[in-house]
Amino acid sequence: MKIGIISDLHIGYERFSQDAYLQAKEALERAASMADALIIPGDVFDKRAPKPETMAEAINIFRALSRRQWDAKVVSFTSKPGADNSAYTDVPIVAISGTHERTAEGKENALRLLSLAGLLVDTSEATTVLQMGDEKVAVFGLGGVSEERVKEKLDELAPKPVAGAFNIFMFHQSTYELLPFSSEFIHYDDLPTGFDLYVNGHIHSRVEAYVHSKRLLIPGSTVLTQLKEGEQESKGFIVFDTKTGDYSFERINSRPFVARHIKIDEATPKSLMSACEVGIEGIISVCEAKPIIKLYLEGTIKGGFSASDMPFRSLSIKYSATAFLDIDSSGLRNTEVDRNIQELREGKIGELSIRELGMSMLGAKLRDAKFDPNIDFQELFNILAEPTSKEKLLIEALEYISKKTVQ
């Protein structure tokens, strides 16, 4: 059986809503023309509560797919005890909810509504068995759950392969091997054993790895949402052959995304504008469609200027018709600010320490106020600067001033 794997469609994503719809539609329709069944590992929608027009877009896509003459059929659906296991369609489109569709436990979500309408099978926390001729494919799905609960959920569900079937474990989670940023992320070893193929969503770039000596496939998203450098690759879907174990990645028409690092030292508004223009126009000249461009600016800002002086808004306005522009200026450093910060860390401003500067300012203020010249402002400063309670500090300072005044 050939299985089309399409993930992270994010229908309804606001910034590139038309891209999300058209690219999801192309991926699903082309995959349906090449495969016997489709599986979707999460995030069909971008929002937990999609707008009515977004729901209409998704319904139109899946309704057309559900009316195709499919050779494979859904023959059984098994969920947790007590759930209704009879209400499912035989249309071989099997999906799970993602993190963007997750709702409070017991609440319906947008994907579940498509399932209730008979347009696909929501196999979150359930096993769906597909059959074509004598061949069976079983898909166990774990919808996206919070990172701190995923191990608990796996223990609770205890997923098991179905005898006599090609078994797929489909999930939607961060994994530590791919994103080693949190101890709460699950490891490959935490995933259940005995499955023939592991399929994950959530990660927006394409990945092939191995879990328990079996292949793990991540097709990546069909639309750009995160503007990360790893998403510059082509968007598309996977077609996997359960008989041979081979697969292919099929590209779809997607908006080009280019990330570019621009290094500039002693930047002025004019020189920064010029450097960005050269980079942007070089990208636009080789792109057939209006590209998404992310500029990473790195270097220093010339003394006398600050980040707020840089022409970021002017660049966005200038290229608004020819590119979607995103500028990351976190790599631009202001040398004067850096120096001031360093001096503060060292307890210095200019050639004076902060303590010396404070002492000098106190002396000047006392002289301006014509305080008794017997008051040693340095000794008074030391009293005021001593870490102690406010009441004790005030008493000691007043006692010192009174004593010196009497003298």
Image (cartoon, helix red, strand yellow):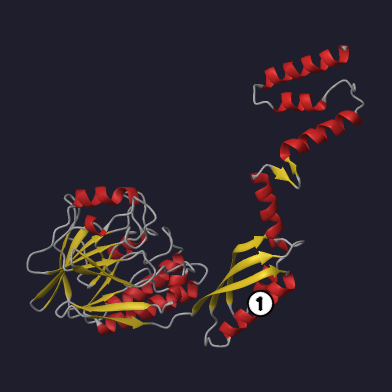
Give the residue displayed 64% in from the left and 76% down from the top. 276
Q: Which sits in the foreground, 260 or 105? A: 260
Q: Is residue 120 left or right of residue 393?
A: left
Q: Is residue 190 left or right of residue 49?
A: left
Total marks in image? 1
Residue 210 % position (x, y) = 23, 68
Which residue lies most toward the front here?
351
Q: Which residue is mark 1?
A: 275
Q: Is residue 232 above or below residue 45?
A: below
Quadrant of residue 121 within the rendered picture: bottom left
Q: As displayed, is residue 353 above or below residue 79?
A: above
Outermost residue to the top: 406
Q: Position of residue 387 (x, y in %)?
A: 65, 26
Residue drawn at x 28%, y 84% is 33
Q: Front-most of 131 and 51?
A: 131
Q: Where, quadrant-wise, is the N terminus in this rendering?
A: bottom left
Identify residue type, mark 1.
Answer: Ala
User: Tag 1: Cα neighbours inside 10 Å, few (<14), some, or many (≥20)?
Assistant: some
Could you tell me which secondary element the residue under label 1 belongs to? helix
Image point (32%, 74%), residue name: 63
Point out residue 13 in the picture as x, y percentages from the top left corner: 47, 67
Q: In front here: 403 or 105? A: 403
Quadrant in the rendering for residue 401? top right
Q: Is residue 343 shown left or right of residue 180?
A: right
- Compared to residue 254, the image places residue 373 above or below, namely above
375 vs 147, left or right, is right
Q: Where's residue 223, x and y in %? A: 43, 73
Q: Which residue: 60% across, 67% down?
A: 298
Q: Is residue 247 above or below residue 217?
A: below
The C terminus - image quarter: top right
